[in-house]
Image (cartoon, rainbow, N blue to C red):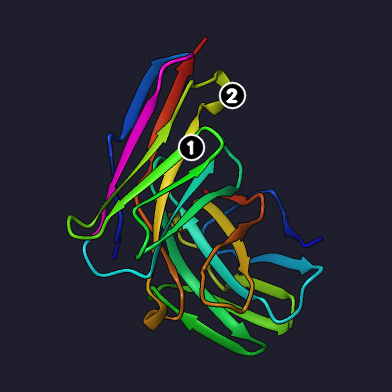
Amino acid sequence: SQQGEEDPQALSIQEGENATMNCSYKTSINNLQWYRQNSGRGLVHLILIRSNEREKHSGRLRVTLDTSKKSSSLLITASRAADTASYFCATVRYNQGGKLIFGQGTELSVKP
Amino acid sequence: SQTIHQWPATLVQPVGSPLSLECTVEGTSNPNLYWYRQAAGRGLQLLFYSVGIGQISSEVPQNLSASRPQDRQFILSSKKLLLSDSGFYLCAWSPSTRTGELFFGEGSRLTVL
């Protein structure tokens, strides 16, 4: 069964604007990860946040995690046309063999 | 550095024909290996994962099977394809640790006609 659910399903913004994507999940987790997928390609790992962390930064990416609300957000600042892609959150539970369970993804379109 | 290769990239097969998708990882040993399927516009569904040679766990009952004949080789097979098997198949690996970070291949697009 799917663990993560992203919101919105699709997001269209202008270059230079910030993009925020949200992810909700249902059960306790050990870590949450965000991945990016360009059309027709494999997924690329962006960032991992552990269950005892609340915020993490990597370049123009900022991820937050609220375990009490079972939710996470991915913020991309100063977006570029090259950021156009689908973004997925994935949750990990170590007592399930460390398997990643992916959400349905947010399709981001950044218009130049 | 580690690399993952997946082939073929594109495949068009008739209903009832067999399937074999291959995935190999280089530059690491004893990786955890995964097969995911992605339907158009949807998220990823975990099909199989393996923590070692000959050790396969199936997540979803279906007419697909997986095998791991060598440490860094993972094969997805079917004896008779169904229309519903169409999709984008992704192989991935992770270090044999608990963090779960995955490294994906470029995918194999299967169309069953």
* Residue, disc 2: A82
Numbered disc in front, either 2 or 1: 1
Q: Position of residue B50 (x, y in %)?
A: 57, 80
Q: Position of residue A108 (x, y in %)?
A: 42, 28
Quarter of the figure with the N terminus of chain B:
bottom right
Q: Which stretch is magenta?
A: A16-25
Residue in the picture at 38% in, 43% down: A105
Tell me the residue at 46%/75% (across/down).
A98
Left or right, residue B109 beside residue A106: right
Q: What numbered label is drawn on residue B34?
A: none
Residue B48, placed above or below residue A58: below
Taking the image as shown, residue B78 lies to the left or right of residue B11, namely left
Q: Which residue lies furthest to the bottom in this view?
A: B54
- Magenta segment, prevailing SS (helix, strand or loop): strand
- Element class at badge 2: helix
Callout 2 amino acid: Ala
Q: Taking A96 as reference, is A30 above or below it?
A: above
Place residue A10 in its image quadrant. Answer: top left
Q: How crowded is mark 2: few (under 14 residues within 10 Å), some or many (20 or more)?
A: few
Whether residue B106 sits left or right of residue B16 in the image: it is right
Q: Which amino acid does label 1 sit on?
A: Leu
Which callout, 2 or 1, points at the residue further toward the start of the chain? 1
